[in-house]
Image (cartoon, coloured by chain):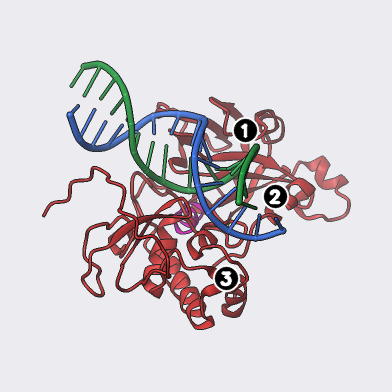
Chain colours: A red, B blue, C green
Amino acid sequence: MPELPEVETVARGLRQSILGRRIVSVTLGKTDFIDDPAALEQHLPGRRISAVERYGKFMLLRLAQPETPESFASNEGGTKNGDSVSGSLLVHLGMTGHIAPFPAARPLEKHTHVCFLLDDGRELRYIDARRFGRMAYLEGPALEEELQEFGADPLVVTREEFVTLIRGHRARIKALLLDQGVLRGVGNIYADESLWKAKIHPARLGAQLTAEQARTLHRALRDILEKAIVLRGSSISDFLDAEGEPGEYQRHHRAYGREGKRCYRCGKLIRRAIVAGRSSYFCPRCQPAPRGFPMLPVPQRGKPRKA
DNA sequence: CTTACGGCCTGGGTGC
DNA sequence: TGCACCCAGGCCGTAA
């Protein structure tokens, strides 16, 4: 389940492997996760990948016009590489998306839905069993509008901005952390991990947090994301980076996925509850529930734990 | 307006 | 071997 650290890891990998390559042709398989499949076929061939950026959980492959002698000569005196008029390929990996270059001769893996033939003979392939991901070619105002929908980057937002942001909403803190319009890039894993580190229960309301708690959460979130990036993300189910390597951060999880295991701080058993519609893992002692939070019996889920 | 919630998409894993 | 079910994250419609 790629979140900010995993997407950052993949983006860095692609930067190493495909930056500057030109897309020769586009081959599409299933396209129900692509906004406008025809737009990819129409606009991508001939374009050069001039940058790979991460925006929340999205990757942006910036596409420049090819530098043909004519376009170079007739260029309106210097818009650089046509970047200002060129668009981007947005890629969201959903839960099971993979994107990486392969030798073109290599047999297609199952669930390969998009192939971009590159000018060095390799193929950039998008593989996604569940197709919960998304792909779109956008340029100009449509691209700007799309990006404008997103909230602050948790690695960039300042402490006091974060405090204002969080305390300005009544929704549960877990919901706020997951809301891409508030903060971009945080998913279930890093929401739970940062709340555990900050000793804040996921069901607390944003507006109910003290400024001090919000500051602590900001610090916890940033520290965790940065460390997770260093460790190339968390490989829970099948996340692999662009080189096919798993991340290491799952070894550092303190809450996520640890139902019934001991809290690393106090030894109490980590619990799971549905908060903001998501499985949420927390320590019932370190992260005291707000008054009235229903201590619902955790819906039975057949996951035998060894004693 | 904001927030809460249920349903939908898909297929791998699991339990029987 | 089969097969029904659960669950993941994002999004959307609806209700309060």
First of labels 3, 2 by sequence position: 2
Residue visible at 65% across and 44% down?
A48
The residue identified by callout 2 is A146
Mark 3 and mark 2: span between their CA atoms? Answer: 23 Å
First of labels 3, 1 by sequence position: 1
Vertical placement of residue A266 versus A104, above or below: below
Q: Nearer the viewer, mark 3 or mark 1?
A: 3
Query: As shown in the figure, which amino acid type bears the numbered disc 3?
Result: Ile
SS class, disc 1: strand
Query: As shown in the figure, which amino acid type bears the numbered disc 1?
Result: Val
- How many discs appear? 3
Vertical placement of residue A210 versus A67, above or below: below
> Are the residues flagged by discs 3 and 2 from a single subunit?
yes
Residue A163 left/right relative to A235: right
| Chain of the residue that carries numbered disc 1 in the rendered image | A
Toward the left, the furthest residue is A307
- Is A9 included in the stretch rendered in magenta? yes
- Is A119 included in the stretch rendered in magenta? no
The residue identified by callout 3 is A166
Q: Nearer the viewer, mark 3 or mark 2?
A: 3
Q: Which labelled disc corresponds to residue A24?
A: 1
SS class, disc 2: helix
Residue visible at 74% across and 51% down?
A145
| Chain of the residue that carries numbered disc 3 in the rendered image | A
> Are the residues flagged by discs 3 and 1 from a single subunit?
yes
Q: Residue A228 at what x, y percent from top left? A: 40, 63
| Front one among A251 and A194 | A194
Residues in magenta? A4-12
